[in-house]
Image (cartoon, rainbow, N blue to C red):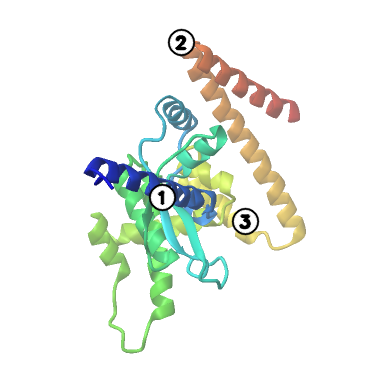
Amino acid sequence: MAKKDFMSLMKEKTVDVRPSLLSAEENIKSQLVVFDELRNLIPPLTDDELAQLEQNILKHGVKDPLTIWETTQAKAGLGTSESPAFVLVDGHNRYQIVRKHGRDFRINLVHFDSLAEVKDYMIDYQLGRRNLTAEQASYLRGMRYNQQKTRRGSNLRADAPAVNIAEVLASEYGVSSRTIRRDGEFASTLEQLDPELKRDVLAGKLSKTAAQKLANQSSLANTPAETSSLSAESKNDKSARRIEALEGQIRKLTEKSLDTQNCLKLIQKANELLGLLSAK
């Protein structure tokens, strides 16, 4: 029998291996789990930023792989099974877009010992990769501070040395320990708000002072009547803020060149504004 040359052997190996690797990756993609608590750690994109990202993906595809935590059902808090679990860590906005349009993407598998480690990684990654607003940076540092306090409190032994978490994080992020403590209070305030209000604060549509006021009102609403009144007031406030935001977005759009994309966005926002005004 004639001896096969090297290229023929390599071709056979490639044909044999590629389907198994491809099927493994596709199997992982089909099992992706998205945790709201991880997605909410990512400062929200503005409408314009999200639209630009979608346009880029449709034109050029997804350039960077999505980061996936390869773990077990038990470690991910999905049950007691040691079966594999795959949790989305980085790329939530890209994943939303590719699912909407049925586009393909690459993945990068990473390993952590716990969900708490994943959160720390995400917070540090976000603080280092984007031009964050002051509110977004404050929220992320505060989340890290609050998580570290909770984790240390639950694992503290009688002989454990005292550690000032605020000072440790202050040194890490280049701010004062007092700032870290205020960040923790701010993060706790945001966690008391509903997701839409929280996004408004992080997007700069609602001030820290207003967020604190809403959180205080929510904590004081002890009776059903008070809760109902606060809910109605909060709903009216949110509607008024949304109307104001839409008016500003429409003005900006009319100042741009009205190409097809901007016209579609203008119609969409005008219809939303019309619906809110009609409901008042």
Element marked by disc 2: loop
| Residue toward you, 8 or 157 | 8
Callout 2: few (<14), some (14-19), or many (20+) C-alpha neighbours within 10 Å? few
Q: Which residue is mark 3?
A: 218
Q: Amino acid at mark 2?
A: Ser
Q: Earlier in the sequence, mark 1 or mark 2?
A: 1
Q: Look at 65% across and 26% down and name the residue there.
A: 272
Q: Look at 47% across and 13% down and name the residue there.
A: 255
Mark 3 touches mark 2? (CB < 8 Å):
no
Label disc, if present, on residue 21 of the rendered structure:
1
| Residue toward you, 105 or 93 | 105
Q: Position of residue 13 (x, y in %)?
A: 33, 48
Is residue 203 in view from this perspective? no
| Residue toward you, 217 or 276 | 276
Q: For the view shown, which residue lies furthest in the right direction? A: 225
Q: Earlier in the sequence, mark 3 or mark 2?
A: 3
Q: Look at 67% across and 42% down and name the residue there.
A: 235
Q: Which residue is mark 2?
A: 257
Q: Please give left or right for residue 69 compared with residue 97 in the image.
A: left
Element marked by disc 3: helix
Image quadrant holding the C terminus, namely: top right
Element marked by disc 1: helix
Q: Position of residue 36 (x, y in %)?
A: 54, 53
* Residue 179 versus residue 265 in the image, above or below: below
